[in-house]
Image: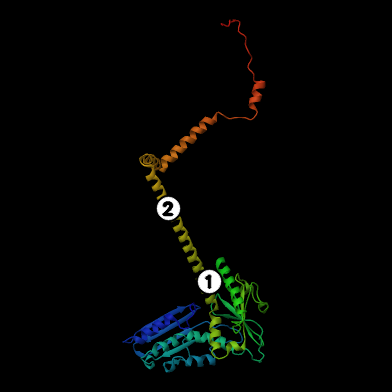
Amino acid sequence: MACFERASPALKDILLKLYRAEKPMEIDHHLYEFGSVQYHIQSSASDPHHTYLSISTPLLSQGALLSDRLSHATIEMIKGVGSNAVDIVEPAKEGYHLTLRLNFSKIPRDKDSVQVITQISAVQAVIISSQLKEMLQNVNSQVTLHGMHKPIKLVYHPREPFFVIRQPQKIIAVFPMRFKENSDVIIATAFFQELMDVGSSQEWAKAPPCIWSPIPPPELRGETFEDLSTNGGFVSFDIYSRHVEGERLDKTVWSLLNFYAYVKSHVKCTRGFVQRRMRKRLESLVKVLQKVSSEEELEEEEEEEKFGKDKDVGCNYMRKLVSLSNSKILKRRHGVLSRKIKRIRFRIKIHGFGRFRRRWLRFPKFSSSMGYTKLD
């Protein structure tokens, strides 16, 4: 799920609309959500008291520890949702893992009605959480299972798998982190390092230890190259028995399932915060420049008033020059440049040519046959 809420917002809106309708409604609606989750809601006017809800959700793993069908513990947890208003239809509709028959007439018409419908809308979260709960509840189990230490690949979203490795006294959850933008990698890396520093402090000693590494941990040795190719490194959490006792089990499971969504939300919020700070900084600099320019204009106006009319005449002349169009200014500059080129075109100077001319290109002196007398 892309959001941190357990209940599906879209499914909740549809069920509330059916519950609050004064007349029976005909509905045959398909709903698709994040993580390849599919809902099918059917309501008929011929059967106004019942609404059928079918749910299809990808199971976390197809390994030996988890089967394709819902376990007995999962079914018992679903029966506790919605009190007497929810019944499980067996077999489920073809193509779906679970079909529920909802009886809105058994839901009390008070403030608790919204809470009951919210619980019904969170059935998909119950199914996913129950599978991981079965694994975490056996942290200290001494039963030897085939492939106990082999990583189990869990897929909550097709592009975001994570691994669970069972060990004698703990369970390790490993998250390969992938990001599209290089800036997101930088923000996420800083977040992971800060998470490690905070987790190692005395105040958060009870939280699951967090480890970030740019390379795969030894527990994932032997996995496929596709699963181990990341640009954001690997984040690991060590789950001990104290983290799955009582109500902590539900919180731990939901935190692990939404870790990817939480990291993406943090990266997005951080990027937006940085952009807002840069925008505010730019606006403040622009205001400073505008203030300086306005002060300079005021000083110029004061100086013009001091100099009087003579200064005004000169300023008027300057304004006329400035008022010339850009095209005229360019034409003038082009004309001046062309005239300079014409003047220097025939003034090409060659270093040492003057000395060569005086020595080898001397013109002969001719003496005139006619003499002249200098007059005093």
Instruction: Give the foreground label among 1 and 2.
Output: 2
Q: Which mark is residue 294?
A: none
Q: Are marks 1 and 2 in contact (CB under 8 Å)?
A: no
Residue in the foreground of this view, choosing between 226 and 95: 226
The reply to whether residue 135 is visible in this rendering is no
The Cα atoms of the two marked residues, 1 and 2, are separated by 42 Å
The reply to whether residue 311 is visible in this rendering is yes
Residue 293 as seen in the image, left or right of residue 158: left
Q: Alpha-carbon neighbours of circle 2 within 10 Å: few (<14), some, or many (≥20)?
A: few
Examine the image and state in which quarter residue 11 appears. bottom left
Amino acid type, callout 2 = Glu
Residue in the foreground of this view, choosing between 66 and 112: 112
Residue 236's spot in the image, x, y percent? 62, 78
N-term-proximal mark, 1 vs 2:
1
Residue 208 position (above or below residue 282): below
Examine the image and state in which quarter residue 41 appears. bottom left
Q: Residue furthest left?
A: 22
Residue at image position (43%, 83%) is 40
Residue 131's spot in the image, x, y percent? 55, 87
Residue at image position (56%, 86%) is 132
Amino acid type, callout 1 = Val
Residue 59's spot in the image, x, y percent? 54, 83
Residue 114 position (above or below residue 362): below
Task: Say what secondary structure mark 1 lies in.
Answer: helix
Q: Classify the position of the C terminus by image quarter.
A: top right
Q: Which mark is residue 295?
A: 2
